Amino acid sequence: MSESYVECLVQGRQNTKAKVLMIFLIVLAAGLAFAAFLFGLFWLIIFTIAAGIGAYFAAQYINVEYEYLYIDKELVIDKIYNQAKRKRVVTYSFDKVQVIAPIKSYHLANFGKLSDKPKDYSIGYEDQPDLRYVMFYEGQEQVLLSPSEDLVKMMKNAAPRKVFTD
């Protein structure tokens, strides 16, 4: 039994909501600390500490990386926050994959346009040249990926009629 294994790490786009929340909480904590020392109110110090703790936890979700693991006809996608916390997002079986092709490939014409909200596990922006891929899964899901060349080769070896490199 031959096992195939490829691992690919992709830096995703920064989470702007978490960044804005962190900045807001830092400014709030600074303002509350100033007011606490100016007016000498102890309960404002408690809110200052709470805002500081909130800013710390918001900072944990700013930087996002995606790890693709290809193991024997399965694609596993993990999300890594700040290079510290890992979360398993989804596992895709290649038996249910319809097509994988570059985002501007003519092979995707039969599958229609990308829906309003495809699941984006890619770098998050259009690069030049655009190396993102689209995967149609079970006729329902559209997934954006940014795989490495090794990962694309391995997927093409596993499913040559489903994976296109144009």
Image: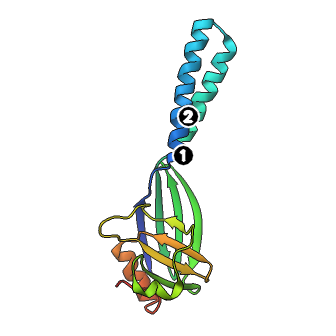
Quarter of the figure with residue 39: top right
Q: Which amino acid does label 2 sit on?
A: Ala
Residue 111 horizontal/vertical position (percent):
53, 85
- Furthest-bottom residue in view? 161
What residue is rendered at 41% in x and 69% in y? Answer: 146
The colour mode here is rainbow
Residue 141 horizontal/vertical position (percent):
59, 76
Residue bearing mark 1 = 17
In this orientation, does residue 28 appear?
A: yes
> Relative to the observer, which residue lies in front, 56 or 74?
56
Rendered view: 109 above or below 64: below
Quarter of the figure with residue 86: bottom right
In this orientation, does residue 2 appear?
A: no
Q: Which amino acid does label 1 sit on?
A: Lys
- The quarter of the picture where the C terminus appears is bottom left
Q: Distance between the residues labelled 2 and 1?
A: 12 Å
Residue 14 horizontal/vertical position (percent):
45, 50
Q: Is residue 6 left or right of residue 41?
A: left
Residue bearing mark 2 = 55
Q: Is residue 48 left or right of residue 145?
A: right
Residue neighbourhood size for the residue with mark 1, other residues' Cα within 10 Å, grouped as few (<14), some (14–19), many (≥20) = few
Rendered view: 41 above or below 160: above
Residue 89 horizontal/vertical position (percent):
58, 64
Residue neighbourhood size for the residue with mark 2, other residues' Cα within 10 Å, grouped as few (<14), some (14–19), many (≥20) = many
Rendered view: 69 above or below 64: below
Label 1, secondary structure: give it.
helix
